[in-house]
Amino acid sequence: MLDFVELWVYLTTGPLFGLTSTVIVYVLAQAIYSQFNHAPWANPVLWSVLFIASILLLTGIQYPVYFAGAQFIHVLLGPAVVALAWPLWLRRAALKNAWRELLFAALAGGAAAIASAFILGKLLGLPMTVLLSMVPKSVTAPVAMGVAQQIGGIPALAAVFAVLTGMIGAISAKYIFDFFGIKTDPLGWSQRGFALGTAAHGIGAARALQVNADAGAYAALALAVQVLLASILIPIGMQILR
């Protein structure tokens, strides 16, 4: 028993805990996800986050201690995002022919995401700093934090809103698309993917890639376009409004 306690103390005070716990939990969540035929509610990112957060709360382990090990996985996020360019390259001819429509859809989708967040927050009587933190909610978390800081929001809160938006989008998108009758033919998959990437950024794109190659490619495109548009247009727009 004493040996076990010493081992636990060693693991929870060093970077090995964050690394091993993240890998083990995600592998188990991915196995369950596959077992349920990739059902949206079984999203491995969602359950991994909930389970690891529960472990940290129950054991009293501080997040910086956990992240000291998890950062070795976090650094792979950059190469993973760059790898999303490959499916786009394979479809470059189709993208070249439809770039005007895609740009218009990205602008409309981004504007709808911003307006819905701001109006809903306003109706709920949220403070302005919280509203400004919600504005970039449909952009991937690192960019959302930077945008929120520029316009007067709270970067940490912006990251929370971005992650929640991605989770909700990845879980609910299939049911919303089915409700509106968006088909699962090649055109329908591209529409689903682009919409999901626009509204739910990286988490949505990951979900799209797991479901269909065309959906994943267009979700990755939407993610990249939203990052570019949001980082430029949101600060300019807020400056004009002020």
Image (cartoon, rainbow, N blue to C red):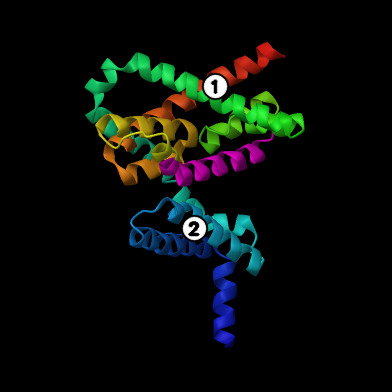
- Residue bearing mark 2: 48
Is residue 9 visible in the rendered image? The answer is yes
Query: Would you say 133 lies left or right of 38 here?
Result: right
Q: Is residue 154 located in the magenta-colored stretch of the structure? A: yes
Label 1 sits on a secondary structure element that is helix
- Between 23 and 198, the one lying in front of the other is 198
For image coordinates 62% across by 15% down, the residue present is 237
Q: Is residue 172 located in the magenta-colored stretch of the structure? A: yes
Q: Quadrant of the C terminus?
A: top right
Residue 31 image label: none
Using the rendered view, name the quadrant where residue 4 is placed: bottom right
Using the rendered view, name the quadrant where residue 27 is placed: bottom left
Label 2 sits on a secondary structure element that is helix
For image coordinates 67% across by 27% down, the residue present is 119
Is residue 230 visible in the rendered image? The answer is no
Residue 60: percent from the left, percent from the top? 67, 66
- Between 161 and 10, the one lying in front of the other is 161
Q: Which residues are magenta?
A: 153-175
How many angstroms separate mark 2 from mark 1 (CA)? 31 Å
Q: Main secondary structure of the magenta part?
A: helix
Q: Quadrant of the N terminus?
A: bottom right
Q: Amino acid at mark 1?
A: Ala
Q: Amino acid at mark 2?
A: Ser
Residue 127: percent from the left, percent from the top? 77, 32
For image coordinates 33% across by 46% down, the residue present is 210
Using the rendered view, name the quadrant where residue 33 is placed: bottom left
Query: Would you say 163 lies left or right of 35 here?
Result: right
- Residue bearing mark 1: 111
